Image (cartoon, coloured by chain):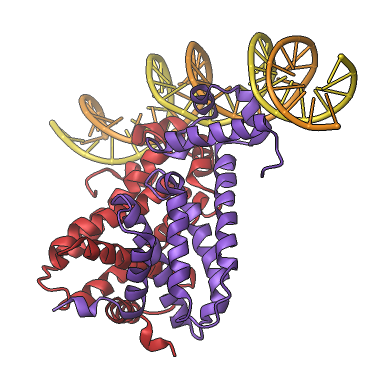
Chain colours: A purple, B red, C orange, D yellow
DNA sequence: AAAAATAATGAACAGAGTGTTGATTTATTA
DNA sequence: TAATAAATCAACACTCTGTTCATTATTTTT
């Protein structure tokens, strides 16, 4: 990623920033290559040197994000679910914070549902060996937790990401393990 | 909805079926009006008599779905969260089953993220008075639960919707209330 | 059953964005 | 400085869009 020359890096960074900016106001499906290049003030032909179309570009950005995610999860060689859960969760919240503008748009109403699905499938594959479900029922529960955590992240982002990653990690672990019965009458 | 004449009903139903069929193979953003009409064997001009574009069409289908949802939730005048939760959840699973082909594609990788967001926002607005959160922390928990339930539905659909709505409702209520700690060593 | 109203069709149109080309200029690396 | 790589510019045919209008088919009203 650092091997490419400065011009290329600048071009791609500019296109990325512009796409994220546009995605704050409209869905990817309504963003044209022409519009993107006009705003970024980059030749349309140049865009095609890097990406096939806007969706391809978004996919590449998503893959970059996944690459970073892999780096984090690989550091943890969890054996049992109870063990290192909190530190891992905390690192994931931190990573989200580091990619806030990207996460904000990709998870928004103008975002990309396939990112949702890929993210969940990715976490599923990666974390399954750790949790190791024994039944179909467990798969349902697992799906519940993954989506739930994503919901936690989305709500955290949308309310300004006020809490620290550590606070959010504790909160996540608690609700995963114990549910909400203790909060009800 | 039943006031419109047969021809119109047929046209719209045919377009709906065709769109759902196409969405099983590709994302909405890659589906053109031309393609949709060619396959449905309907004049392209006719499409524009009903919808502004493909996204507008999808939005109308989504709104129909929400309308049905409203009908269900309105039947419940829940006072406390513990009360009627299970029957409501069961009805929601049943409704999903009744709209299976639509739900399957709209929640898939080729689906529409704004449907996700609208659905969650809708449930948020509708159910908030029932659960009535007291703190920001509660909002986080609530977001976790909503997304989690959606995850449950998605996994249920993707594994062939084998369990009955009743079974799923029990399962949902259990994990919402108690988490997964009892399933771990 | 005939007349009036509504819906779908077919053909045609300008307009916008696409993806590609080849020649040229600019920036980076050796 | 020379060689290489990247970005630009203008031009191209192509596809889909959204709209129009005259025509045909179906439904509803009288």
Q: Which residue lies furthest to the bottom in this view?
A: B185
On the image, the x and y values in percent for residue B133 come to 17, 64
On the image, the x and y values in percent for residue A83 come to 47, 80
Question: In screen coordinates, is A15 left or right of A97?
Answer: right
Image quadrant where residue A68 sits: bottom right
Q: Which of B93 and B36 is in front in this view?
A: B93
The residue lying at 33 percent from left, 79 percent from top is B175
Instruction: Look at the image and tell me whether residue A91 can be seen.
Output: yes
The C terminus of chain A is located in which quarter?
bottom left
The N terminus of chain A is located in which quarter?
top right
The residue lying at 29 percent from left, 77 percent from top is A179
On the image, the x and y values in percent for residue A156 come to 33, 56
Please tell me whether residue B131 is drawn above or below residue A164 in the rendered image: below
Q: Which of B7 and B88 is in front in this view?
A: B88
Please tell me whether residue C8 is drawn above or below residue B100 in the rendered image: above
The residue lying at 17 percent from left, 78 percent from top is B82
Image quadrant where residue A142 sits: bottom left
The number of numbered discs placed on residues in the rendered structure image is: 0
Please tell me whether residue D28 is drawn above or below residue B45 in the rendered image: below
Instruction: Look at the image and tell me whether residue B65 can be seen.
Output: no
The residue lying at 43 percent from left, 29 percent from top is B45
Q: Which of A104 and B105 is in front in this view?
A: A104
On the image, the x and y values in percent for residue B168 come to 34, 78
Question: In screen coordinates, is B124 left or right of B26?
Answer: left
């Amino acid at each position: 990623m650092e091997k490419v020359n400065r011009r290329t890096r600048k071009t791609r960074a500019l296109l990325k920033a512009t796409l994220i900016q546009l995605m704050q106001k409209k869905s990817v499906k309504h963003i044209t290559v022409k519009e993107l290049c006009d705003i970024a003030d980059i030749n349309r032909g140049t865009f095609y040197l890097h990406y096939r179309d806007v969706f391809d570009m978004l996919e590449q950005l998503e893959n970059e994000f996944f690459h970073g995610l892999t780096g984090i999860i690989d550091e943890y060689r969890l054996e049992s679910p109870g063990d290192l859960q909190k530190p891992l969760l905390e690192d994931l919240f931190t990573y989200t914070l580091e990619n806030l503008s990207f996460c904000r748009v990709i998870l928004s109403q103008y975002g990309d549902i396939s990112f949702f699905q890929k993210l969940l499938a990715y976490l599923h594959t990666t974390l399954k060996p750790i949790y190791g479900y024994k039944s179909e029922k467990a798969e349902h529960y697992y799906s519940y937790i993954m989506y739930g955590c994503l919901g936690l992240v989305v709500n955290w982002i949308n309310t300004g990401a006020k809490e620290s990653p550590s606070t959010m990690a504790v909160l996540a672990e608690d609700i995963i393990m114990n549910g909400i019965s203790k909060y009800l009458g």
